[in-house]
Image (spheres, rainbow, N blue to C red):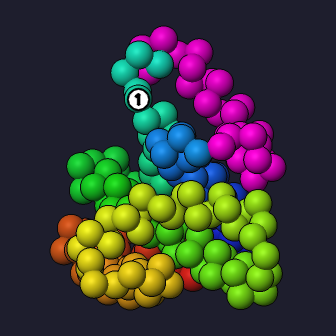
Amino acid sequence: MQFLNFIVLTVTQIYIFCFLLREWIDFIKICQYTYCFQMIVKITDPILKLINKIPTLNNILYFKSFFIAYIFTVLSIIFIIWTKDEFPKINLSLLIICFIQLLTYIGKLIFWVILIQINLKFFHKQNSDINFILNQILEPLLYIVKNIFPFLNQVNFLKIIIILVLFPLNFLKNDILLLIDSRIAEYLLTNSNLL
């Protein structure tokens, strides 16, 4: 069961990150002809095409990629509960927990984008295409942090502040989940190495 758990949760996480990244890139309207973006498009397009075939969803949903990432989050949490020999009841508390978990994935995505960019800058002194894309992706976020801390001019310090904010937010998330539904929160905490 551990192997199945690992495979299912890893695949759903990859899809969640890809859909979130696609939504982010579409939202900030950066260059869409790079190799990195084309790879994300190839991964996410089959599912987006299925959503586009449903006319009611196509008219309502403006953030389709975000919605699909949320569906994958719901499915992954339902799968975790199912592996604990319980059949989950889809209620409001479960949907709220799934939304909080999706926000956690957004935080993790930001963390990994910052970490990859810092490592690329450290090991490759010249500007690469990937580094340029990551700069464009992080620019809106760094702009917000710069407005909050105007005395910090160095970009690297701003990135460190973002990372330092993400860590306590992760612990706060655990506390909120325990308040909403302690049983589901415990299941998520036992699978925290996979989530």
How many neighbours does mark 1 have within 10 angstroms: few (below 14), some (14-19), or many (20 or more)? Answer: few
Residue 41 colored magenta? yes
The residue lying at 52 percent from left, 16 percent from top is: 54
Residue at the image position 71 percent from the left and 47 percent from the top: 37
Q: Position of residue 158 (x, y in %)?
A: 41, 81
Rendering coords of residue 104 (x, y %): 42, 68
Q: Which quadrant of the figure contains the C terminus?
A: bottom right
Magenta segment, prevailing SS (helix, strand or loop) = helix
Quarter of the view holding residue 118: bottom right
**Residue 3 percent across, percent down from the top left:** 74, 72
In the rendered view, would you say 92 is above or below 64?
Answer: below
- Residue 33 belongs to the span the image colors magenta: yes
Q: Is residue 4 left or right of residue 75?
A: right
| Front-most of residues 3 and 43 | 43
Disc 1 marks a residue whose amino acid type is Tyr
SS at badge 1: loop
- Residue hosting label 1: 62
Q: Which residue occupies 63% across, 52% down? A: 18
The range drawn in magenta is 31-57
State whether residue 84 appears in this view: no
In the rendered structure, the answer to whether residue 191 lies left or right of residue 100 reads: right
Q: Is residue 84 left or right of residue 124?
A: left
Front residue of this view, candidates 33 and 113: 33
Q: Is residue 31 in view?
A: yes
Q: Position of residue 194 (x, y in %)?
A: 59, 75
Which residue appears farthest toward the top when viewing the image?
Answer: 55
| Quadrant containing the N terminus in the rendered view | bottom right
